[in-house]
């Protein structure tokens, strides 16, 4: 299995200058290629391929920009290839059209030396020898002594190196249980076995710090050194929030993939949830998409299986004890109370148990308020009918309810009709 390793670099001042210069060359080549493709599309011409763009770059740009020869030739070549890949994704309607890069944002560049069979980027455990840059100190040793290529990137005021390595799958226990996981806002994740993983809520905790630093940036004059210092301070806090969130998700996903054979999570539409402006900040602070992305490759690493539950499955509305489907539950109700069997359970834990029991083609019972509102003729208990009997998610018939005297169901139906529709994400 191919995995990526990322560690921090400790460059000196001269190497920092070379890093910025290499990032500038990569950005210039990317923007030039983007402008070239846009010009061809405006003239209704065929978009040039990555090879054609690279040939034009060598013939038209390099002779006029001598500073291109001060960095490795792989840097502009990879930047042009990445730009063409971005346009291919746009043509396939996977993503939007690529935009021009701005100085100081997402600075990165690609380095390559040697071949896959004979890699020449070597490290001695404490340093790594990068082409056209030299020996750079490592914050921690890499798992391999020689690599073929790498990517250098910047986050806030720190530089990182990313490399790939083929690893062997680790040994895991044979008899591992399956688990259902409910992702939420209050808690990061609640498992069907009762485990609760708290949400660090890093962005919310540092909101005051963000406001203070953002005001400091807005007060500084554009282009001044003081504004640059203020932006650097703000970027450090953003990096800290990102690291806290990634640390919590990495620990959670590793624990789940390593100790369980099957992991069931809901196939949530995070993009749709973020359109709810009242909950968008809290949802983004959880890192739900990152949670799923990490589970996808960690389940392969630990030989487990990731199962995506249908997003229309009402996990929070079904009783995990008797299987009956109650009325809708607004997000403010954190305790699930079954109206039939009297079962009381935490909302997220009840949902996690239902997710763990889900399978393809499961029977979803009719909701109580829908059944009560759809009844046109009152029926007595002494005349049971198939249309008025309820079936639980486990396939059992529940008792018949006399709808004339059941004012509780009627009140719930009227109450739900006046409530706005809300997405069940917690």
Image: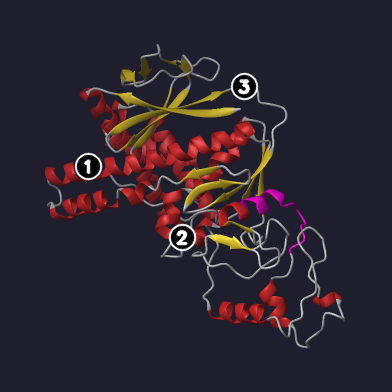
For the N terminus, the quadrant is top right
Of callouts 2 and 1, the N-terminal one: 1
Q: 119 and 202: which one is in front?
A: 202
Q: CA distance from mark 1 to mark 3?
A: 41 Å
Residues in magenta, as a range: 351-364
Horizontal and vertical percent for residue 73?
38, 28
Q: How far is disc 3 from disc 2 in space, using C-alphas?
A: 38 Å
Q: Quadrant of residue 97?
A: bottom left
Q: Looking at the rendered structure, which numbered label has been put on residue 233?
A: 1
Is 415 situated above or below 28? below
Q: Is residue 24 left or right of residue 327?
A: left
Q: Is residue 202 above or below residue 116?
A: below
Query: Is the residue 152 above or below the residue 204 in the image?
Result: above
Quick one: label 1, few (<14), some, or many (20+) residues within 10 Å? some
Q: Is residue 360 magenta?
A: yes
Which circle's residue, 1 or 3, is located before the other in the chain?
Answer: 3
For label 2, the SS is: loop
How many numbered marks does the figure carry?
3
Residue to which mark 3 is pinned: 168
Q: Residues within 10 Å of mark 2 (few under 14, many from 20)?
A: some
* Circle 3 SS class: loop
């Amino acid at each position: 299995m191919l995995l990526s390793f990322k560690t921090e670099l400790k460059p000196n001042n001269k190497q920092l200058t070379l890093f910025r210069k290499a990032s500038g060359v990569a950005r210039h080549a990317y923007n030039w290629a983007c402008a070239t493709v846009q010009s061809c599309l405006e003239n209704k011409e065929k978009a040039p391929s990555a090879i054609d763009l690279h040939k034009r770059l060598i013939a038209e740009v390099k002779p006029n920009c001598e500073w291109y020869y001060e960095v490795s030739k792989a840097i502009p070549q990879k930047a042009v290839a990445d730009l063409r890949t971005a346009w291919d994704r746009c043509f396939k309607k996977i993503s939007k059209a690529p935009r021009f890069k701005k100085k100081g944002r997402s600075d990165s560049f690609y380095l390559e030396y040697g071949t896959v069979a004979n890699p020449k980027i070597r490290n001695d455990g404490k340093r790594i020898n990068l082409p056209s840059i030299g020996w750079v100190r490592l914050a921690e040793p890499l798992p391999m002594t020689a690599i073929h290529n790498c990517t250098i990137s910047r986050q806030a005021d720190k530089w990182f190196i990313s490399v790939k390595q083929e690893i062997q799958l680790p040994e895991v226990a044979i008899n591992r249980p399956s688990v259902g996981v409910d992702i939420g806002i209050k808690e990061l994740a609640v498992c069907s076995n009762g485990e609760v993983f708290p949400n660090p809520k890093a962005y919310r905790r540092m909101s005051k710090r963000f406001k203070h630093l953002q005001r400091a940036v807005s007060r500084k004059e554009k282009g001044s050194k003081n504004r640059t210092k203020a932006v650097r301070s703000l970027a450090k806090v953003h990096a800290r929030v990102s690291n806290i969130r990634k640390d919590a998700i990495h620990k959670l996903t590793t624990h789940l993939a390593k100790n369980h054979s099957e992991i069931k999570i809901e196939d949530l539409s995070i993009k749709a949830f973020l359109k709810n402006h009242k909950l968008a900040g809290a949802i983004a602070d959880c890192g739900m998409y990152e949670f799923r992305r990490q589970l996808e490759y960690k389940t392969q690493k630990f030989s487990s299986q990731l199962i995506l539950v249908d997003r229309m499955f009402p996990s929070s509305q079904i009783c995990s004890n008797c299987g009956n489907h109650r009325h809708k539950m607004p997000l403010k109700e954190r305790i699930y109370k079954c109206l039939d069997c009297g079962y009381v359970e935490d909302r997220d834990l009840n949902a996690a148990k239902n997710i763990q029991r889900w399978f393809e083609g499961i029977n979803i019972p009719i909701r109580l308020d829908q059944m009560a509102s759809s009844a046109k003729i009152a029926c007595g208990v002494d005349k049971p009918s198939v249309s008025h009997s309820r079936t639980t998610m486990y396939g059992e018939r529940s008792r018949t309810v006399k709808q004339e005297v059941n004012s509780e169901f009627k009140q719930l139906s009227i109450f739900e009709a006046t409530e706005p529709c809300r997405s069940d994400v917690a």
